[in-house]
Amino acid sequence: MMGRTIALLAAAGLASLALAAQAAPGGKLGTLPHGTYACSTPGDAMGAPWNVIPGGEFTIDTASTYRTETGSGTYLLTDDRLVFTRGPLKGERFVRTGTTTLQRTDSEGVPRRVRCVRGPSR
């Protein structure tokens, strides 16, 4: 009888964990295409269409890792939302607007002027 009670409690615990995992916010986990992303801000009608941010590039490597001129770190991609979780870009947030294009957002998800585009492999 005691063994059956323990088994039922264990099953109930596992079921509640499964429900909690399904209800967790975030979305489907993913990874970005490997390569170097150059970041820029919009230009104007009198000059270049985009102004590249000096030193504002990063390279996506394997296993949700990235690197910059100043170090490396990790990122988390859920659905189309990207957040850098460790390293020199920690806390930076983006929304994926295309297969190779990201747009910086604030912590509330409001788009900012900076966009980053993956260039050809080097």
Image (cartoon, grey):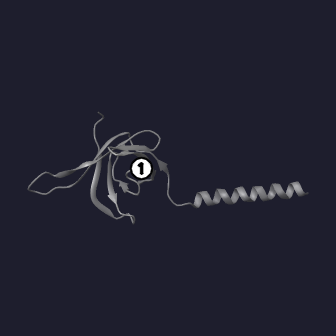
Disc 1 residue crowd, few under 14, some 14–19, many 20+, Cα 10 Å: some
Residue 66 higher or lower than 18, as above or below: above
Question: Where does the image place residue 51, in percent across and percent down from the top left?
Answer: 18, 52
User: Which residue carries the number 1 mark?
Assistant: 87
**In this rendering, would 66 be left or right of 52?**
right
Quadrant in the picture for the C terminus: top left
Q: Residue at x 74, y 59 (%)?
A: 12
Q: On the image, which quarter does residue 45 sit in?
A: bottom left
Q: Residue at x 73, y 59 (%)?
A: 13
Quadrant in the picture for the N terminus: bottom right
**In this rendering, would 7 be left or right of 49?**
right
* Tally of numbered tags: 1
Toward the viewer: 111 or 40? 40
Q: Residue at x 46, y 51 (%)?
A: 76
Question: Where does the image place residue 3, in percent across and percent down from the top left?
Answer: 87, 54
Toward the viewer: 58 or 27? 58
Q: Residue furthest top?
A: 122
Q: Residue furthest left?
A: 46
Residue 111 higher or lower than 80, as above or below: below
**In this rendering, would 64 be left or right of 119?**
right
Q: Residue at x 58, y 61 (%)?
A: 23
Indicate the secondary structure of the residue bearing disc 1.
loop
Question: Where does the image place residue 56, in percent across and percent down from the top left?
Answer: 28, 49
Question: Where does the image place residue 60, in percent across and percent down from the top left?
Answer: 38, 42
Badge 1 amino acid:
Gly
Q: Residue furthest front?
A: 70
